[in-house]
Amino acid sequence: MNHSIARWALWPLALALALSACGGSGDEGKVAERAVARTTSDATANPSATSASAAAGGFDFATWVAANAACKGEYFADVQDPAFAHTLSAAGIEVSADSTIGEVGPGGGSLTPRAPTRLHGLPIVRVDYDFGSGSTFAVVVHASAEQARAAIGAQPLAEIYREYYRLGVPTAAPSEDTPMPDIQFVRDGDKPGTQEIGCAAFDM
């Protein structure tokens, strides 16, 4: 994945979350219910996150994306659940061939909506995700740098983030225990006319 960040040690947490969230049932309905439960409040707070495709079994991809891009979701638990592949397919989402959907442990991949889908009113091209010893959830959108920055109110980040991210919004103030809080970020996309808006988590 372009713009990949160094991997820190988060995958044991992701594994624990996946196992506790899935309960070992493999029931796709539970996956959808879990995602919807986590993202309902975010949908209210982010009315610009809309999808032309209807929710599949109660799962709304745009709402799920909005929550995770705002650092309010637990996508790594969902993508490690084997049932989530069917949930995505039913919602009209194309999963990349290299995606690790359903595999426990560090992973990554790309998700592409077949129907027009938006984040903050900006058309989504695809979602790139990567987690292992840290995590990145990056939503690639058609937008100018100014539009993407305005969408999250991005500001210059502290020097400690500058190796990977320059503009964004920390989710908390740094502390002795957490010198690098999770951030919402914005940066140039891999193609002209695109930007990435997303969430990065660090394990330090």
Image (cartoon, rainbow, N blue to C red):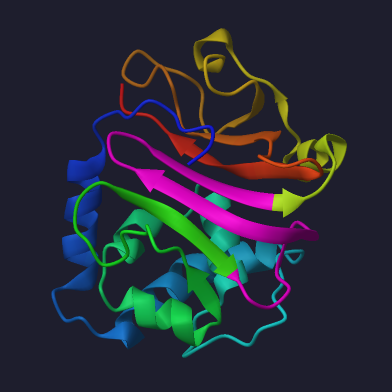
Q: Is residue 116 visible?
A: yes
In reply to whether residue 134 is colored magenta, the answer given is yes
Q: Residue at x 79, y 40 (%)?
A: 192
Figure check: 90 above or below 135: below
Find out whether residue 56 is within the magenta segment.
no
Image point (31%, 28%), residue name: 203
* Type of secondary structure dominating the magenta stretch: strand
The span picked out in magenta is: 113-140
Residue 202 spot, x, y in % from top left: 38, 29
In the picture provided, is 21 more to the left or to the right than 180? Answer: left
Against 76, is 11 above or below?
above
Q: Nearer the viewer, residue 107 or 16?
A: 107
Rendered position, 162 above or below 62? above
Quarter of the picture containing the C terminus is top left
Q: Position of residue 166 (x, y in %)?
A: 64, 20
Drawn side of residue 162 relative to residue 179, left or right: right
Residue occupying the point 73% across, 24% down:
155
Q: Nearer the viewer, residue 121 or 3?
A: 3
Residue found at the far top of this picture: 159
Above-or-below relation of 189 to 69: above
Q: Residue at x 80, y 60 (%)?
A: 121
Residue 74 appears in the picture as rendered: no
Residue 63, x across and y down, in percent: 59, 68
Which of the 4 quarters of the picture holds residue 127?
Answer: bottom right
Q: Quadrant of residue 19?
A: bottom left
Instruction: Please state the total of marks drawn on the protein image.
Output: 0
Q: Position of residue 37 (x, y in %)?
A: 44, 73
